[in-house]
Image: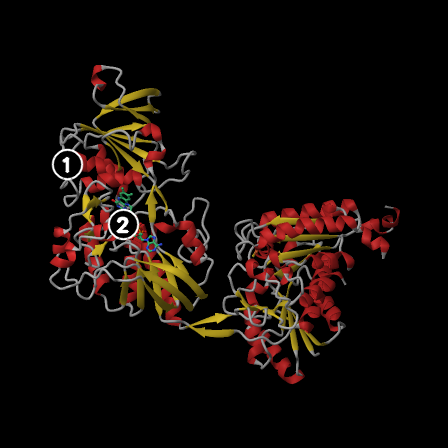
């Protein structure tokens, strides 16, 4: 933790968000449309489906200096492509284990199901996750670099 | 690379919490950006003109707009690019309103996040390639599967508008469950009287090709161009010769229980299911025909004047091409024998509701007489609601029609047997519908005893002289809070509606999803109740969930309207965001084939590679991220493009 203390003064984590176009991205839009205020730390990237998310995206995000990754898609059973999110679920377990081997705490990556009508859930998830990562401090990969 | 960057104030919606000037300055210093401009409303005509003029005068090769969500105006700006001669896919939007300005009061942080999203969009757009949206023509025909009232209604609506319809029904006649009903609530019109004219219309309509005694065997293709294989089962009677005189049936020596009459009556081995059948074509049931089972008989053949009987008829495969499909396969009723304590199947005079519909029908097996096994008329009847419905052990959902048809039964019993004692055992009365509450009130006034409580058991074990020789219905009266025993002569079990037994198989063939109960799943429970997740595939009637006839007809008309709108437009636009497999890198491992939710990947055995059928692909990208050889690219969402965004937001 010593190395991180320098940056601790105003540590604002960078969290990369991968949101599926059909549910989570729309849920995020809805949070905005409803003028819900939440921390600005999550940087959204739109993908077609959570099933499209390649583990290397997550690894690249951490390698490029992300402090966390949030993946959000349709609720199980509601995926626009039927089962894409089940595939994401399986890959997620794998990615998490992989990250642990690099010394990245599992709390830094999160998978959530957020429907297009769940603007408030989106705001809540982002708020929670930002706080959690603030507590964890900057990603350990940053120290290495 | 010549990128034009444009940022929108959206009045004060963005400008209040994002420093426009600063983001513009930031963007203008990024690689490739040759111009950066702002405007109060980028989406307005002058805003779009600004972009169009720059594309032309500055020879822009890419455009990025930082404004609202792409869901709002991506298509607007793409069209502007196209207007100015730039491929519309060489454009990218940064969502700095919904995702940034509206979510904060902190202008400094808002500006910072806006910069991150702008950097990502600019890095991404550099990698964009020109893409083409494809248009495919739509085959001007519709397949309707199932000839109940839903399929009949949908077919007629389509055919009347001049569309070619193929109506496939697996039974020898169309009509479905409605043909079996006697009267229909709440107006009590005779079911056959309102259904038969429609059936006849289907049979004679020049735009409808009725394929009865047939089943769909294979479905391939996609919206606008579905390829269907249908098997027509042999009925051993030549349709073009049979005149429907019925002499064959009269002479046939074989008697078997009639499915149409719920096994209460008999039919012959050569038969029509009911007199008003459409098509009026006699069918030989192979499983009961003596000639097929024992090798001799052929009496029907001998008596047929027109020589229509043809024992050599073979199964026929029919291949058709249609632009849209309507699935209208209806429902099945709950099997009451599963609830042993209710006595169905082992106690005489315990019958199901659908059996009762046949019994009270004047053309039914008993000529409309309500009678007990011994031929006498019952003096008391109990009608048990919710058999198999609203029950944790069976189906949790409400079947929606049983309260109403149960009360219809009370009314009909009262009409035939004025002095009978009639009991309705219900959990709640659900009479929500036009004229339904009024019907309930009418039945309440007809001296019918309503007992609030689920019938738990039906037994012959008498505990007193009053119960002797009777069926005793045991229940808890939940209004009085006491257990009750009600001796009656006849018990009618109001069985609920269930998915067809083969619904899962039908779902697989048409690539439909099912809800938890097994009914087919619509695209959206409120806003798209007839569409499905598969474009060009629609649902009609009770196959989507329990419905009464008015709702079925409305649902079926809606399905017809959706199919019609698609056919009339004449083309389908196929977005270019599709998976493409590189011939050189594909190792032929076939992993992607099973992963594709749309079966859009085929295997080319000759070249040993997988090939995406572009029109079937919906662009989810599941195959891309699973391909071990990285041979698949999702156009518009390539790995490089997404990773450029990752680097951009973190830069
Ligand atoms: C006892 C009882 C009484 C009722 N009384 C009333 C009433 O008074 N008023 C009212 O409004 N509603 C009543 N209903 C409800 C009514 O029956 C339904 O609303 C209506 O019949 C549903 O029509 P459908 O076309 O959707 O389905 P169905 O009538 O079930 O028709 C489906 C058709 O599809 C065919 N089919 C199935 N699978 C396939 C396949 N794979 N390939 C080809 N063909 C196939 C079937 O053979 C059938 O012909 C009653 C229901 C019951 C059980
Ligand atoms: S489309 Fe949202 S998870 Fe698949």
Structural crowding at the residue carrying mark 1, measured as other residues with C-alpha within 10 Å and reported as few (<14), some (14–19) or many (≥20): few
- Quadrant of the snapshot with the C terminus of chain B: bottom right
Q: Position of residue B148 (x, y in %)?
A: 29, 53
Image-quadrant location for residue A22: bottom right
Alpha-carbon distance for marks 2 and 1? Answer: 40 Å
- Quadrant of the snapshot with the N terminus of chain B: bottom right
Q: Position of residue B282 (x, y in %)?
A: 19, 57
Image region (quadrant) for ligand 2: bottom right
Image-quadrant location for residue B348: top left
Chain where mark 2 sits: B
- Kindly identify the residue that appears in the image at 44 percent across and 64 percent down: B220
- Name above or below for residue B43 compared with residue B245: below
Q: Residue pushed farthest bottom?
A: B57
Chain where mark 1 sits: B
Q: Which mark is residue B495?
A: none
Q: Residue pushed farthest front?
A: B295
Q: Are marks 2 and 1 on the same chain?
A: yes
Any part of residue B19 in sight: no
Image-quadrant location for residue B262: top left
Q: Are marks 2 and 1 in contact (CB under 8 Å)?
A: no
In the foreground, B451 or B10: B451
Name the residue carrying label 2: B287
In the image, taking residue B474 as reference, residue A47 lies left or right, namely right
In the foreground, A83 or B341: B341
In the foreground, B628 or A56: B628
- Kindly identify the residue that appears in the image at 76 percent across and 48 percent down: A100
Q: Which mark is residue B415?
A: 1
Which structural element holds mark 2?
A: loop
């Amino acid at each position: 933790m010593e190395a991180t203390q320098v940056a601790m003064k105003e540590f604002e984590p960078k969290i990369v968000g991968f949101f599926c176009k059909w549910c989570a991205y729309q849920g995020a839009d809805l949070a905005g449309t409803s003028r819900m205020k939440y921390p600005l730390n999550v940087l959204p990237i739109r993908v077609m489906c959570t099933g499209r998310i390649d583990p290397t995206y997550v690894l690249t995000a951490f390698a490029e200096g992300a402090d966390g990754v949030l993946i959000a898609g349709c609720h199980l059973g509601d995926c626009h492509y039927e089962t894409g999110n089940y595939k994401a679920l399986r890959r997620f377990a794998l990615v998490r284990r992989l990250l642990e081997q690099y010394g990245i705490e599992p709390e830094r990556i999160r998978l959530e199901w957020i429907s297009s009508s769940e603007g408030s859930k989106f705001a809540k998830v982002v708020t929670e996750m930002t706080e959690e990562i603030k507590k964890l401090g900057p990603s350990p990969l940053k120290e290495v670099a | 690379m010549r990128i034009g960057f444009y940022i929108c104030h959206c009045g004060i919606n963005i400008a209040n919490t994002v420093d426009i000037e600063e983001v513009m300055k930031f963007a203008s210093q990024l690689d490739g950006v040759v111009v950066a401009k702002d405007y109060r409303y980028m989406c307005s005509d002058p805003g779009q003109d600004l972009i169009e003029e720059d594309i032309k005068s500055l020879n822009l090769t890419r455009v990025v707009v930082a404004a609202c969500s792409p869901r709002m105006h991506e298509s607007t700006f793409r069209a502007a690019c196209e207007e100015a001669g730039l491929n519309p896919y060489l454009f990218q939007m940064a969502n700095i309103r919904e995702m940034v300005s509206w979510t904060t009061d902190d202008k400094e942080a808002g500006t910072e996040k806006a910069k991150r999203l702008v950097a990502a969009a600019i890095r991404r757009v550099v990698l964009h390639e020109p893409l083409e949206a494809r248009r495919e023509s739509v085959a001007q025909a519709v397949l309707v599967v199932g000839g109940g009232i839903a399929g009949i209604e949908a077919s007629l609506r389509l055919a009347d508008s001049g569309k070619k319809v193929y109506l496939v029904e697996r039974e020898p006649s169309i009509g479905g469950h409605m043909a079996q009903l006697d009267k229909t609530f709440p107006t009590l019109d005779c079911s056959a009287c309102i259904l038969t004219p429609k059936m006849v219309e289907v049979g004679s309509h020049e735009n409808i090709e009725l394929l009865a005694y047939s089943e769909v065997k294979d479905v391939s293709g996609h919206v606008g161009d579905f390829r269907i294989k249908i098997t027509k089962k042999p009925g051993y009677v030549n349709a073009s010769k049979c005149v429907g005189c019925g002499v064959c049936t009269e002479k046939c020596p074989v008697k078997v229980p009639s499915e149409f009459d719920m096994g209460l009556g008999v039919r012959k081995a050569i038969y029509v299911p009911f007199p008003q059948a459409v098509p009026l074509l006699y069918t030989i049931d192979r499983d009961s025909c003596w000639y097929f089972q024992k090798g001799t008989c052929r009496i029907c053949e001998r008596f047929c004047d027109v020589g229509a009987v043809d024992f050599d008829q073979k199964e026929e495969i029919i291949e058709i091409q249609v632009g849209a499909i309507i699935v209208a396969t209806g429902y099945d009723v709950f099997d009451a024998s599963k609830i042993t304590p209710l006595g169905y199947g082992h106690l005489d005079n315990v019958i199901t509701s659908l059996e009762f519909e046949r019994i009270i029908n004047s053309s039914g097996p008993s000529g409309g007489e309500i009678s007990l096994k011994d031929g006498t008329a019952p003096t008391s009847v109990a009608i048990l609601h919710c058999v198999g419905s609203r029950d944790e052990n069976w189906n949790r959902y409400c079947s929606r029609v049983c309260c109403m048809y149960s009360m219809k039964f009370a009314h009909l019993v009262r009409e035939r047997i004025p002095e009978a004692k009639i009991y309705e055992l219900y959990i709640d009365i659900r009479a929500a519908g036009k004229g339904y509450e009024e019907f309930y009130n009418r039945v309440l006034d007809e001296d019918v005893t309503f007992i609030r409580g689920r019938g738990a058991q039906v037994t012959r074990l008498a505990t007193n002289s009053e119960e002797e020789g009777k069926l005793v219905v045991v229940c808890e009266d939940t209004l009085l809070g006491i257990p009750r025993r009600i001796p009656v002569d006849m018990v009618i079990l109001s069985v609920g509606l269930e998915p067809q037994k083969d619904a899962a198989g039908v779902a697989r063939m048409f690539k439909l999803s099912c809800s938890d109960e097994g009914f087919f799943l619509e695209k959206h429970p409120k806003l798209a109740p007839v569409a499905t997740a598969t474009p060009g595939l629609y649902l009609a009637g009770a196959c989507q969930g329990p419905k009464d006839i008015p709702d079925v007809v409305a649902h079926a008309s809606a399905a017809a309207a959706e199919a019609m709108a698609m056919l009339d437009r004449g083309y389908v636009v196929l977005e270019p965001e599709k998976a493409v497999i590189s011939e050189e890198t594909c190792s032929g491992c076939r992993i992607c084939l099973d992963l594709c939710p749309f079966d859009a990947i085929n295997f080319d055995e000759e070249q040993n590679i997988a090939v995406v059928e572009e029109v079937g692909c919906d662009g989810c990208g599941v195959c891309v991220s699973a391909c071990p050889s990285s041979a698949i690219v999702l156009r518009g969402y390539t790995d490089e493009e997404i990773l450029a965004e990752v680097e951009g937001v973190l830069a």
